[in-house]
Every structure is written in structure tokens, then in C-alpha cells.
Image (cartoon, rainbow, N blue to C red):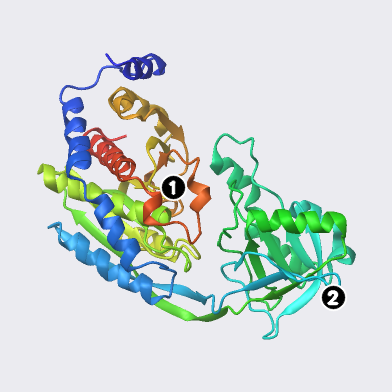
């Protein structure tokens, strides 16, 4: 027995069966072989991100990707492929942004700071704006300044992702409120604009996009992310002279909601066709990004799961469904529309698993359910997954797109790859095909297919 397999067996909670059911190891081997020797996930990812980069809600790129997805799923010979109409928000960036630290005297030049308008930001006046800048490390620190310390200024949120957090997602969750809620909080205290340090551990000049939460009351302000190196330069300048000024130009605009689509393909179940097992990712990406890891990888893996089952000639007991959701990045309209349709139609989703953490090597799954600690029940399968480097089932609540199905009674899940490098590329122009390793991408697709096969055979 391999050492990794032995360790997985020894770590199983007491009372759970350690020995795989006869035939299970052989089937998982067939699934992984089909992915690693005949996989099409990387080929599909290459087509998606090369032909259709910048797939933001409302864009032609996204709707062209919808057509590509429908064509790709249809080519698998599935039992049904269709689209679900979804009205999505339509925000456009416009001309490139400019954020500059103004010179202190006539003998100096302004310092250009690498920046991207945050998703949803309003524009500056046509000629831009300029104001003193004040640095804070959190929304709490901002609120402590009060209106007197904030009004009329540009607030610079410079709280870094925690480098001590072993899990990058924990570091991201600990810092992202500055981006998602910081600009609105600054506006309520009278700030004229906001800058936010990019959400990444990397030290580079690549700014990271991402949404910020506004409300339609007219009290919003322009907001942009700046690269981590730009944030360090600005912070150093303010340490020398706290009375520095920033100029900003943002050209973004809001347009009326646009028509988009979820793309859905399925293999009909032979015994329990009304019970649905779903695998999915989101088709949209930020406008400046090819979206290879976020979430082209998830799209390609979800398609690949159904391709693997077709290639193996597997006839599922339950209906297996691939859903490519629209508008995850700046609205979740696709996920909400899908869940609403499931609720109104009475469809029974027994399991819905998402892949939206990048195309890196798989390490485990998070699982959540309203019917108890499902992640503990799934640990009986650890000996089957250990040979493929997958060692954990953790408690979770699914990803953003499948989460709404949990309240409808579905067990939800999320593929957990190794994400140490994920936030180097997340929401950036460098989230490109070359950052994804084909073998790691195919291992993730096989892991998803293996878990889905087990759930289809045994349930959770």
C-alpha cells in the first residue's frame, strides 16, 4: 500500500469504513486515466480564453463565449443542451484610467501609479479630480477618523493580505472588505474618491480588478485598485510628507441591463432522472482579463466531467448536469436565476459542486449541507482519493454560484486546489493560458468526475 494511502486510512475518523467497495478503485483509475491521457480540458480552455477574453457581463465577448459553450457541449452528444436567459448588469470601464501622485514642486514629475477602476465605479469628472490623500489600513481605521478627517480627501486603503495566513483564501477574506465596502464607507464620510491596495500577496506592478458595492442613491465616489508596488510607493511618499495630492481620471459608465445566458448540458439519469447532480463554473471574467484561472479553468473542467463520462460510456443513475453560470463577478444574476428556476420548477438537486478557485492541482473538497456534517460522511472515500494527492473533505458552504441551492436542500461543494499562486493572477490581465498547467487542470477535472461518480452511486 502506498504511504499516502496508508496515512489516509489511518486518519479516517473512527467508525467509518476504511476499505473501498469492490470496483471503486478501478473506476477511479479509469476516470483519471481518461482525463490524463485523453483530456480535452486544456484544449477547451485555450479556445475559450484565446477567442473570448474579457468576458464581463453585458459584453459581446461574454455572449460570444455563450455561443462557444453551447457548441462545445453539443459536440459531446449530451441528452440535452440549452440556455437560460438572464438579465445582467452592464458596466463598462471606458478609456484607460490614470492615477498619479502629483509632484511637490516644479522640478519634479508626477508619479503614475498602476491602477484599474473597480467594477461598478462611477467616473470622475471629464477633466479628472485632484485632492489630498489619506492612508488607512482598514474600514475601522477609516471610521475612527470621522467626517472631519476624511471629507474632501481621497482615501487610500492600504491593508495588505495577511502574509502569515497559510491559506491564501483566509488572507483574501480578511482584506477584501476594503475593496468591496471601503469606497462606499469613505463616500459616507465625505471622501471624493478611493484607492485600494490590490488583493494579492505578490509584489508587482499588476493592478487587480474586482467589484465594489455601491447603492443607487447618488452618494458614490470613483474608486480604483492600485498595484502592490504602487501602494508601497504611495505609502512611502506619505510617510515623508502626509500632505500629498493625487489626481485621478476614470471613464467608466453604467448602461441598461443586458441579456445574457446560463449554458446547461446534461446526461439524463437512468434510474433517478429527477435527482440532479450539478457541476459548474462561471463563464464571465473581468473585462481586462482572459480569465484563465478565474474561471476559465472551472468552465473547462465542468465540461470535461461530462466528456469523461461520455468517453467511458457511463450511464448515470441520476441526471448529471453541467451549468456554466453567467455574471458571477459583478452580480451573481446567473446563480440566482438558476436557483429561482429550480425552486419554481421543484427540481431536486441532490449535489451541486463548483470549481472556481483556479486550475491548480486538486487537494480536496469543501462540502456543506443542511442535513448534517456531510464532509464527515464523505471521508469514507479518502482512501480512494489519496493516490491522486487529494487528502481532505472540509466543512464548507459551496461556492458563490452553487451556494443558493443549499437553502433548497442540496448538498453543495467546492473543489479545493492548491491556491498559493491563485491571487497572483486573480482579476488581472496576466490571468493567461500559460499560467495554467495542463496536467493540474486535468487532475482537477478527474477529481470532480470521481466525486460525482461516487455520489451518483452511493449518495451522501
Label 2 sits on a secondary structure element that is loop
Which label was assigned to residue 106? Answer: 2
Q: Residue furthest front?
A: 107
Which label was assigned to residue 127? Answer: none
x then y, percent, for residue 279: 31, 49
x then y, percent, for residue 384: 28, 25
Q: Residue at x 29, y 37 (%)?
A: 451
State the residue position of label 1.
357
- Give yes or no for contact between labels 2 and 1 (Cβ–Cβ under 8 Å): no
Residue placed most toward the observer, 116 or 144: 116
**Horizontal relation, residue 442 to residue 436: left or right:** left
The reply to whether residue 274 is visible in this rendering is no
Q: From this view, report whether residue 22 is shown above or below residue 183.
A: above
**Horizontal relation, residue 278 to residue 14: left or right:** left
Q: From this view, report whether residue 460 is shown above or below residue 66.
A: above
The quadrant of the rendering that contains the N terminus is top left
x then y, percent, for residue 436: 37, 48
**Closer to the eye: label 2 or 1:** 2
Q: Quadrant of residue 124?
A: bottom right
Among numbered discs 2 and 1, the one appearing first in the sequence: 2
Q: Residue at x 86, y 58 (%)?
A: 145
Q: Residue at x 16, y 27 (%)?
A: 26
The quadrant of the rendering that contains the C terminus is top left
**Horizontal relation, residue 133 to residue 24: left or right:** right
- Give the CA distance from mark 2 to mark 1: 48 Å
User: How would you rate the neighbour count of disc 1 (Cα within 10 Å): few for under 14, some for 14-19, many for 20 or more?
Assistant: many
x then y, percent, for residue 447: 30, 38
Q: Residue furthest bottom?
A: 126
Amino acid at each position: 500500500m502506498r504511504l499516502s494511502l496508508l496515512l489516509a486510512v489511518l486518519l479516517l475518523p473512527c467508525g467509518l469504513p476504511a476499505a473501498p467497495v469492490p470496483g471503486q478503485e478501478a473506476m477511479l483509475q479509469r476516470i483519471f486515466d481518461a482525463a490524463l491521457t485523453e483530456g480535452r480540458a486544456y484544449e477547451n480552455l485555450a479556445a475559450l480564453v484565446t477567442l473570448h477574453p474579457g468576458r464581463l457581463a453585458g459584453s459581446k465577448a461574454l455572449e460570444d463565449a455563450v455561443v462557444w459553450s453551447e457548441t462545445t457541449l453539443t459536440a459531446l452528444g449530451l441528452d440535452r443542451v440549452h440556455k437560460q436567459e438572464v438579465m445582467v448588469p452592464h458596466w463598462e470601464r471606458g478609456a484607460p484610467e490614470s492615477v498619479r501622485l502629483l509632484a511637490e514642486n516644479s522640478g519634479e514629475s508626477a508619479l503614475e501609479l498602476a491602477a484599474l477602476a473597480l467594477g461598478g465605479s462611477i467616473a470622475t469628472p471629464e477633466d479628472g479630480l485632484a485632492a489630498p490623500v489619506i492612508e488607512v489600513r482598514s474600514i475601522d481605521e477609516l471610521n475612527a477618523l470621522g467626517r472631519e478627517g476624511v471629507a474632501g480627501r481621497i482615501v487610500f486603503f492600504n491593508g495588505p493580505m495577511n502574509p502569515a495566513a497559510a491559506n491564501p483564501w483566509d488572507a483574501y477574506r480578511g482584506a477584501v472588505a476594503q475593496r468591496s465596502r471601503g469606497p462606499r464607507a469613505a463616500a459616507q464620510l465625505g471622501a471624493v474618491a478611493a484607492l485600494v491596495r490590490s488583493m494579492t500577496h505578490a509584489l508587482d506592478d499588476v493592478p487587480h480588478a474586482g467589484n465594489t458595492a455601491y447603492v443607487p442613491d447618488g452618494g458614490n465616489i470613483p474608486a480604483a485598485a492600485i498595484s502592490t508596488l504602487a501602494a508601497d510607493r504611495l505609502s512611502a511618499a506619505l510617510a515623508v510628507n502626509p500632505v500629498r495630492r493625487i489626481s485621478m481620471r476614470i471613464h467608466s459608465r453604467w448602461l441598461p441591463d443586458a441579456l445574457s445566458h446560463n449554458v446547461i448540458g446534461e446526461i439524463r439519469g437512468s434510474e433517478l432522472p429527477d435527482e440532479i447532480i450539478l457541476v459548474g463554473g462561471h463563464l464571465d471574467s473581468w473585462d481586462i482579463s482572459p480569465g484563465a484561472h478565474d474561471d476559465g479553468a472551472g468552465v473547462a473542467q465542468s465540461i470535461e466531467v461530462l466528456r469523461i463520462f461520455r468517453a467511458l460510456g457511463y450511464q448515470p443513475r441520476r441526471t448529471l448536469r453541467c451549468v456554466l453560470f453567467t455574471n458571477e463577478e459583478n452580480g451573481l444574476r446567473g446563480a440566482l436565476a438558476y436557483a429561482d428556476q429550480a425552486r419554481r420548477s421543484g427540481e431536486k438537486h441532490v449535489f451541486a459542486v463548483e470549481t472556481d478557485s483556479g486550475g491548480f492541482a486538486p487537494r480536496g473538497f469543501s462540502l456543506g449541507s443542511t442535513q448534517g456534517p456531510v464532509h464527515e460522511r464523505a471521508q469514507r472515500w479518502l482512501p480512494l482519493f489519496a493516490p491522486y494527492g487529494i487528502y481532505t473533505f472540509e466543512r464548507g458552504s459551496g461556492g458563490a454560484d452553487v451556494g443558493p441551492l443549499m437553502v433548497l436542500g442540496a448538498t453543495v461543494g467546492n473543489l479545493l486546489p492548491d491556491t498559493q499562486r491563485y491571487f497572483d493572477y486573480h482579476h488581472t490581465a496576466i490571468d493567461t493560458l500559460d499560467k495554467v498547467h495542463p496536467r493540474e487542470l486535468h487532475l482537477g477535472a478527474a477529481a470532480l468526475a470521481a466525486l460525482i461518480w461516487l455520489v451518483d452511486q452511493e449518495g451522501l
